Image (cartoon, rainbow, N blue to C red):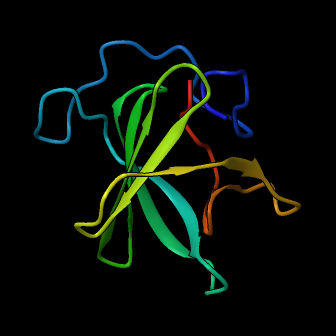
């Protein structure tokens, strides 16, 4: 769960003043590997909106939004759907997963 000390291998911790990407507050995209459900691993990008609190994954043209309330609760929104609570869990492949959406690599979590 974000904000509770879980960070990925090589995570970018403690960054401040994230900018770039052509939009205020957005970091440069972080290249990762993602998997949706039981699908294959594929290249994806993470954009941090607010470090440890709000981020987006771009997977095969789909944008998936995440929000963390700083108290251990994470919500996810997929393709115009509503925000749904999700559990963040590390799996055996060193990937962080949120209810079937998994990402691995240098995750900038907190």
Residue 43 as seen in the image, left or right of residue 25: right
The N terminus, quarter of image: top right
Q: Along the line of sight, which residue is nearer the eye, 59 or 17?
A: 59
* Left-right relation of 98 to 18: right
Look at 31% across and 23% down and name the residue there.
18
Nearest the eye: 102 or 67: 67
100 relative to 48, above or below: below
Q: Residue at the spot x=11%, y=37% of the render? A: 23
Residue 57, image quadrant: bottom left
Return the x and y of residue 45 as percentages of the image width and height: 41, 58
Position of the C terminus, as image quadrant, is: top right
Q: Quadrant of residue 63?
A: bottom left
Quadrant housing residue 71: top right
The residue under the point 69% across, 32% down is 7
Instruction: Classify 6 as above or below 85.
Output: above
Q: Position of residue 72 (x, y in %)?
A: 62, 27
Q: Residue at x 43, y 28 (%)?
A: 53
Q: Is residue 26 left or right of residue 98?
A: left
Q: Position of residue 47 (x, y in %)?
A: 35, 45
Residue sticking out furthest to the right:
92
Number of marks drawn: 0
| Residue 13 higher or lower than 100, as above or below | above
Measured from the top left, where is residue 34 in percent x and y?
Answer: 56, 68
Compared to residue 28, the image places residue 46 above or below, namely below
């Amino acid at each position: 769960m974000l904000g509770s000390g879980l960070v990925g291998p090589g995570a970018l911790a403690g960054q401040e003043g994230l900018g770039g990407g052509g939009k205020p507050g957005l970091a440069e995209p972080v290249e990762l590997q993602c998997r949706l459900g039981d699908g294959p691993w594929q290249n994806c990008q993470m954009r941090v909106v607010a470090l440890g609190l709000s981020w987006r994954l771009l997977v095969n043209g789909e944008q998936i939004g995440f929000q963390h309330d700083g108290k251990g609760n994470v919500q996810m929104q997929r393709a115009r759907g509503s925000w749904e609570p999700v559990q963040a869990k590390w799996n055996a492949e060193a990937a962080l997963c949120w209810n079937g959406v998994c990402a691995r690599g240098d995750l900038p979590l907190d």
